[in-house]
Amino acid sequence: MKSVIKKNLFLEGKTKKIYNTNNPFQVLIHYKDNITACNGLQNKFLQDKGILNNEISTLVFKFINSCEIKTHFIRKINNREQLCHKVDIIPLEFVVRNIVAGSMSKRLNIKEGVRLLNPIFEIFYKNDKLKDPLINDHHAVFLGIISYEELNNIYKIISNVNNIIKKYFLDKNIILVDFKIEFGKDHKNNILLSDEITPDTCRFWDKKTMKKLDKDLFRMKLQEDVLDIYMEILKRLNVK
Ligand code: UDP
């Protein structure tokens, strides 16, 4: 295995930093110790959260890779960093919902917890100035971000990913309520599942008690320190 040399910082987001490497087609993704919500209005330092999210996302992406779905993830390098294929992120957030919660509950005035007969897919346009508005396929194509063919391809992938990770989490007594995921294009124009899958980007409920096990506790100011909850998720994922 060729050794990875970390080079310049290429991008910094709210919870991750991306570094170039000695391979032009690969990057190092570094997980920071921040937790943020409400478009960055809530932002807190949480010692070692990055270590937990790096490990949680590694386990989930390893599982997805083992199901022959193409992702950006290559391997974990150290406790805060993972090696990934370099992609141009498509500026769309895809949300997959199995149970009503969060913005869908508020927008449509439906009680949180209502089970959906079929998963619902939503697209949010990643644009800080516009505060990431909810858009549809036609808007995304009109904006020149993506083609209908690519969207159909992505819908097939997220449907597949949802089915496999829903079961993966349920086996660990975790209900996958909803999640957000992003896609990127590599240098050969392949569409790869990218981003992270962690309690920052998913709603997880305990199978028995239906208690929240994710960032909602911070977002809704129900609990200041959510580190033990993230640890609980990791503990469950590690149970064979
Ligand atoms: N989500 C995310 N990043 C965002 C917005 C949402 O990871 O910028 C995740 C969120 O954790 C949840 C799902 O996407 O699992 C659906 O979020 P929702 O649209 O309900 O919005 P929110 O309640 O976060 O405003």
Image (cartoon, rainbow, N blue to C red):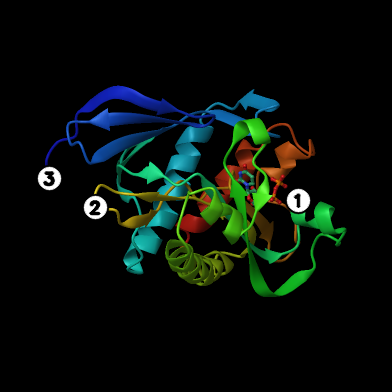
Q: Earlier in the sequence, mark 3 or mark 1?
A: 3
Of the 4 image quadrants, the one containing the C terminus is bottom left
**Marks 3/2: CA–CA distance:** 22 Å
Other residues around mark 3 within 10 Å, as few (<14) / some (14–19) / many (≥20): few
Which residue has dot 1 on it? 103
Which residue has dot 3 on it? 1
Q: SS at mark 2?
A: loop
Horizontal and vertical percent for residue 86? 30, 42
Q: Nearer the viewer, residue 172 or 121?
A: 121
Other residues around mark 1 within 10 Å, as few (<14) / some (14–19) / many (≥20): few
Horizontal and vertical percent for residue 165? 50, 65
Horizontal and vertical percent for residue 120? 65, 67
Q: Is residue 156 left or right of residue 63?
A: right
Q: SS at mark 3?
A: loop
Asked if labels 1 and 2 touch by Cβ distance under 8 angstroms, the answer is: no
Q: SS at mark 1?
A: helix
| Residue at figure coordinates x 36%, y 69% from the top left | 67
Q: Which mark is residue 133?
A: none
Asked if labels 1 and 3 touch by Cβ distance under 8 angstroms, the answer is: no
User: Does the closest atom of ligand 1 sit within 8 Å of the Cβ of label 3?
Assistant: no
**Marks 3/1: CA–CA distance:** 44 Å
Residue type highlighted by circle 2: Lys
Other residues around mark 2 within 10 Å, as few (<14) / some (14–19) / many (≥20): few
Residue type highlighted by circle 3: Met
Which residue has dot 2 on it? 188
User: Does the closest atom of ligand 1 sit within 8 Å of the Cβ of label 2?
Assistant: no
